[in-house]
Image (spheres, rainbow, N blue to C red):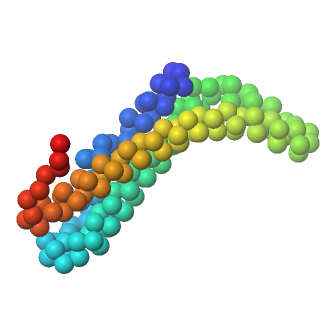
Amino acid sequence: MGREKILQSVKSEIPSVDKILEEAWNELKFTRNFVKKCFGSALILFEEKANEIYRDYEKKALVKLSKYWIELQKEEIKRRLKETVEQEDWENFIEKASEIFSEFGKLVQDFEKDMGNKRKARGGKSFEKIVLKLLNFIGVKCEVPR
């Protein structure tokens, strides 16, 4: 599996904005009275909970990324780790270990760049949908402008 396929597969593990917001909503169990009296607080709590859930999915995706990376080259990694551990001095050990970890680091950088872009796009959509959900919950009829 190539680098792009690995990243795509891992990113597909993160659910849609709607699914994350549904999870957050179900966990928060707001009452109508609370939302009416503390709309701003409800908005902040909802956004924070959704962000927490998103970050949890992101962490799981990162673990999956590391497992894919290791699985795809396990024999090479075993060989290189054995070679690294056998170094006679600390400087050579650090040099060899750094080579192994920097390769994975490049993959993580690509993942983090993609996730950062996804987070930005998700943030705006989430806020809009949270406001809509809360307003509808307390009986204020509204819809997203098109």
Which residue lies at the image location 44% right of the left edge and 30% below the top edge? 8
Residue 64 visible from this viewpoint: no
Number of dots carrying numbers = 0
- The residue lying toward the viewer, choosing from 67 and 10, is 10
Please name the residue shown 49% across and 28% down the image: 6
Front residue of 5 and 34: 34
* Outermost residue to the front: 146
Q: Quadrant of residue 118?
A: top left
Q: Position of residue 67 (x, y in %)?
A: 54, 36
Q: Position of residue 38 (x, y in %)?
A: 23, 76
Q: Is residue 127 above or below residue 79?
A: below
* Image: 86 above or below 23: above
Determine which quarter of the picture holds residue 46. Answer: bottom left
* Side of 77 where 34 appears, left or right: left
How far across and down, in percent of the image, does residue 65 sit?
A: 52, 36
Q: Can the viewer see residue 106 in this picture?
A: yes
Residue located at (25% from left, 47% from top): 18
> Considering depth in this image, is 23 or 43 the residue closer to the camera?
43
| View extreme (top): residue | 1
| Residue at 88 percent of width and 45 percent of height | 90
Q: On screen, 87 above or below 36?
A: above
Extreme-bottom residue of the structure: 37
Residue 132, image x, y percentages:
18, 57
Q: Quadrant of the C terminus?
A: top left
Is residue 6 rendered to the left or right of residue 29? right
Q: In the displayed structure, does residue 9 sit left or right of residue 67?
A: left
- Position of residue 64 relative to residue 18, above or below, is above
